[in-house]
Image (spheres, helix red, strand yellow):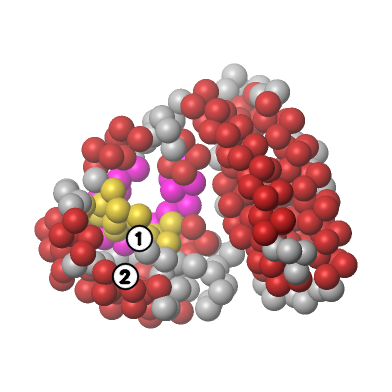
């Protein structure tokens, strides 16, 4: 049971993950084929004690008993910032790439294998499947953030949390749209161009290709990092953010 690549992540995440991974492997033994770290934990965007630590656990089989015996270690991990892992089987990965193209590309662009073999070497994403999920995600998020704003009752804490949560969810589809847009503009006839991983660079590229107002998203990133702003400023940011999502929805519809 060889755990690897922990030296490539932050000291903070390393310290938390090592005992967690050892316990998972003790519990599941040979049933675990791979464990993958993905998301901000592999990048410069990781902020100790604020950023989530996201894992994918790939097992030969996943039944109720397998999940049940994972509950205690997962519950303890959540208290330390390790989100409940995504459990897959190899077959599930092979047969789900058409319905979750954004998610799988996010994994492939931003992951680190901590145990076992690389599960994403044979990943193949259809471009039209990707475009359709981009449209579904952006338009769905537009509907949801309107609803979520009403659920805040206009309160400062609610709007702040809404902006932070929405930012986390909007970056992956924006990256996917950048990928599609870059392919369309590529003189190489559709060569795959991987978008940047760092959020600030994603927003910079989106400003160039899509025409978004990067400042709105940059202000949201600052709020996520702890910047305090007034209720009037939060409302102004949300108003501008809503406009930008509407703009992106029109853009993706034309791709």
Secondary element at image label 1: loop
Q: State yes or no: discs 2 and 1 in contact (Cβ < 8 Å).
A: yes
Is 113 covered by the magenta stretch? yes
Residue 167 in view (yes/no): no
Residue sitting at x 49%, y 67%: 52
Write the start and end of the magenta stretch as one range.
105-120
Which image quarter: residue 254? top right
Task: Report the side of 36 relative to 212 (left or right).
Answer: left
Residue sitting at x 28%, y 48%: 88
Secondary element at image label 2: helix
Between 247 and 190, the one lying in front of the other is 247
Task: Report the side of 237 relative to 126 (left or right).
Answer: right
Q: Name the mark on residue 190.
A: none
- Residue 118, above or below 52: above
Instruction: Quickly name the residue at label 2.
Output: 74
Instruction: Quickly name the residue at label 1.
Output: 85
The x, y position of residue 2, in whole percent, is: 20, 66
Which image quarter: residue 113? bottom left
- Residue 250, above or below 171: above
Task: Report the side of 183 relative to 62 (left or right).
Answer: right
Whole-number angstrom distance, CA of label 2 to CA of label 1:
8 Å
Q: Residues within 10 Å of mark 2 (few under 14, many from 20)?
A: some
Residue sitting at x 49%, y 46%: 106
Q: Earlier in the sequence, mark 2 or mark 1?
A: 2
Is 223 covered by the magenta stretch? no
């Amino acid at each position: 049971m060889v755990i690897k690549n922990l030296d490539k992540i932050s000291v903070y995440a390393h310290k938390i993950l090592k005992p967690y991974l050892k316990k998972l492997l003790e519990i599941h033994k040979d049933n675990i084929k791979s464990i993958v770290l993905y998301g901000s934990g592999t990048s410069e965007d990781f902020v100790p004690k604020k950023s989530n630590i996201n894992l994918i656990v790939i097992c030969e089989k996943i039944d109720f008993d397998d999940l049940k015996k994972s509950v205690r270690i997962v519950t303890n991990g959540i208290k330390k910032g390790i989100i409940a892992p995504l459990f897959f089987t190899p077959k599930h990965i092979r047969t789900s790439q058409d319905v979750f193209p954004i998610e799988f590309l996010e994994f492939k662009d931003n992951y680190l294998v901590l145990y076992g073999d690389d599960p994403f070497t044979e990943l193949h994403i259809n471009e039209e499947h990707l475009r359709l999920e981009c449209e579904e995600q952006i338009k769905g998020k537009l509907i949801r953030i309107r609803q979520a704003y009403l659920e805040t009752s206009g309160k400062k804490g609610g709007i702040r949390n809404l902006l932070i949560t929405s930012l986390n969810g909007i970056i992956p589809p924006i990256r996917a749209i950048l990928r599609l847009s870059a392919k369309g503009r590529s003189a190489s006839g559709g060569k795959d161009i991987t978008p940047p991983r760092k959020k600030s660079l994603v927003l910079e590229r989106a400003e160039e290709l899509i025409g978004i107002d990067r400042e709105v998203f940059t202000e949201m990133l600052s709020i996520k990092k702890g910047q305090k702003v007034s209720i009037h400023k939060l409302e102004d940011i949300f108003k501008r953010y809503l406009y930008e999502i509407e703009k992106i929805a029109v853009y993706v519809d034309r791709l």
